[in-house]
Amino acid sequence: MDTVKQSAAGSAVATGLRGVVAASSSIGDVNGEKGELIYQGVSIHDLATKSTFEEVVFLLWNGRLPKRAELEELKASLSASYKLPADIVELIKGISKRVPAKADPMDRLRTVISALAMFDEEANDLSHEASIRVATRLTAQFPTIVAAIDRTRNNLEPVEPKPDLNIAANFLYMMKGEMPDEFDAHVLDVALILQADHELNASTFTARVVAGTLANMYSAVTAAIGALSGPLHGGANTAIMKILLEIDSVDGVENYVKDALSKKKKIMGFGHAVYKTEDPRATHLRRLSQEMGKRKGDTKWYDITAKLEEVMKREKGLLPNVDAYSASTYYMMGIPLDLYTPIFAISRISGWTAHILEQYADNKLIRPRAEYVGPRDVPYVPIDEW
Ligand SMILES: CC(C)(COP(=O)(O)OP(=O)(O)OC[C@H]1O[C@@H](n2cnc3c(N)ncnc32)[C@H](O)[C@@H]1OP(=O)(O)O)[C@@H](O)C(=O)NCCC(=O)NCCS
């Protein structure tokens, strides 16, 4: 699709801002032609196979990989912040008591993060030192909040975080109320690494626009959660799981895709605004989804996704993105469908905060122009003369 159109006034309008370079950043780079992704220069393939989410958080915030002592220090600050202020726990419980049971966890998460700002005395200190501390608290508390949202909406007491667990294992522990399977915790850790940053994606751009007004980090992150929740962005992982459940068998894939495409319906988890070849994150999630299926003794959900990949490539030339195989992977781990996007947020908070830090460090208000296509010289008609 041609994304640059000529305006009536003769200027070029980049619909969806495709191809527009709106910031200089050293955090992450996507090479859509080659299918490459790097965080601060380090390949996602190395990070996905050799690193941990906590190490990636350090990398994103500090521009280089940590030494052992630095990583230990970051892990200690994160685990010291896992626990939520008591009033926030009460707020989460209160929300679960009062809102309709089907209220989306992303709406609840957005509300809780917005409220959290008022409990952080450093929220409006935009210095680098204070902002790193706020980013640490946010990154540490996202999993605690999401797990508490899930438990309280199911009439269960929130589970206190365990400071000796890493972010991935701790989230599964707090959500299920029991120590997680080691492989499940490892897979979630890799999934968090893979989703941590993706350059100027819609939610990160949103965060930078808000930070660019010098609003505090909580405001920027609250807005980013809103942007992530949409089905064209982070919401795609839940949407594709619904599709997999509807298809329910490898044999059903051909007809489902043909029918959907004939009705111009999108198959979530496929296609990408930047990648023109394999999304490197899908490479790892495909492997993990298959491995998870084998370990759980049922590769059905992996098999349906793989067949979907084959048919989508043949019919539309579209390839799987990060969401395609993360859906089946989370499903096999027993994670509720509507927590897939909050898990994306548990990961992406690291990238959002890295970009907010970068924005604060060299700020310029983000204020593009719109091509005006409405009427001009419209006479004012007093209201009683209509
Ligand atoms: C990600 C996405 C928004 C990028 O799209 P884009 O580059 O802006 O391209 P468009 O949405 O304009 O789509 C271009 C064409 O491909 C089709 N297309 C794109 N993704 C498709 C999908 N997942 N299923 C079916 N058709 C799709 C569009 O219908 C359009 O067809 P047309 O030219 O016949 O109208 C798009 O691929 C999409 O909606 N994918 C599904 C949602 C998703 O998985 N999002 C997570 C991204 S990580």
Image (cartoon, grey):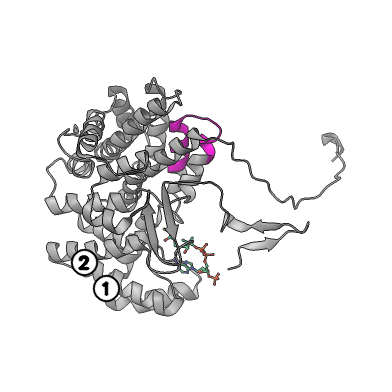
Q: CA separation, marks 1 and 2? A: 16 Å
Q: Residue 175, image x and y in percent? A: 21, 42
Q: Residue 301, image x and y in percent? A: 25, 66
Q: Residue at (12%, 66%) from the top-left corner? A: 297
Disc 2 residue crowd, few under 14, some 14–19, many 20+, Cα 10 Å:
many
- Mark 1 vs mark 2, foreground winner is 2
Principal secondary structure, stretch drawn in magenta = helix
What kind of residue is marked 2? Gln
What kind of residue is marked 1? Ser
Specify which label sits upstream in the sequence, 1 or 2: 1
Q: Residue at (44%, 66%) from the top-left corner? A: 271
Q: Residue 46, image x and y in percent? A: 27, 56
Q: To which quarter of the image does residue 3 belong?
A: bottom right
Q: Is residue 311 above or below residue 182?
A: below
Magenta-drawn segment: 209-225
Q: Residue 232, image x and y in percent? A: 46, 56
Location of mark 2 (residue): 290
Residue 40 vs residue 319, the one in the foreground: 40
Query: Which quadrant would the C terminus be assigned to in this image?
Result: top right
Q: Residue at (17%, 41%) from the top-left corner? A: 173
Q: To which quarter of the image does residue 130 belong?
A: top left
Location of mark 1 (residue): 249
Residue 310 vs residue 136, the one in the foreground: 136
Residue 157 vs residue 296, the one in the foreground: 296
Q: Is residue 83 above or below residue 310?
A: above
